[in-house]
Amino acid sequence: MKPVLIVQGTKDIQVSPQDAQLLRQANPRAELAMIAEANHVLKTVHTEERDENLAAYSHPGLPLAEGVLRTISTFILRNAGTTAVTPKTPPAGAK
């Protein structure tokens, strides 16, 4: 079974922490990372206001919440080599 990382923001208004727990329980190899103050698109939200949370979805100037990149990169490095990845060969004549 391939490793799975579930990244859940504590301010996610689309997927609840309970749903994330159920996903984790459904796969024994799954890891769950809860990111404080992160919304569904993993950007920092400091308010409970739905409109402000949604506005963060399309705000290109907002960085990812603290810990997102570290969590994902650590997971990838820790699991490197645990799954075989076969590169696709481009069709003959493809550029």
Image: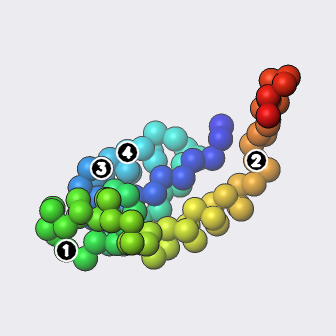
Amino acid bearing label 2: Thr
The residue at 63%/60% (across/down) is 75
Query: Residue at coordinates 67% horizontally, 58% vertically from top-left?
Result: 76
Three-letter amino acid code of the residue under disc 1 = Thr
| Residue 80, percent from left and from top | 75, 54
Structural distance between the alpha carbons of marks 3 and 4: 11 Å
Q: Split into 4 quadrants, where in the image is the C terminus?
A: top right
Image point (39%, 66%), residue name: 60
Mark with earlier residue (4, 2): 4
Residues packed near mark 2 inside 10 Å, few (<14), some (14 to 19) or many (20 plus): few
Contact between labelled residues 2 and 4, with CB atoms less than 8 Å apart:
no
Kindly report which numbered mark, 3 or 4, lies closer to the viewer in this rendering. 3
Q: Which residue in the protein does label 3 denote? A: 15
Task: Give the amino acid type for the residue marked by disc 3 in the picture.
Answer: Val
Comparing labels 4 and 1, the label whose residue is closer to the camera: 1
Query: Tag on residue 22?
Result: 4
34 over 2 or under it: above or below: below
Q: Residues within 10 Å of mark 3 (few under 14, many from 20)?
A: some
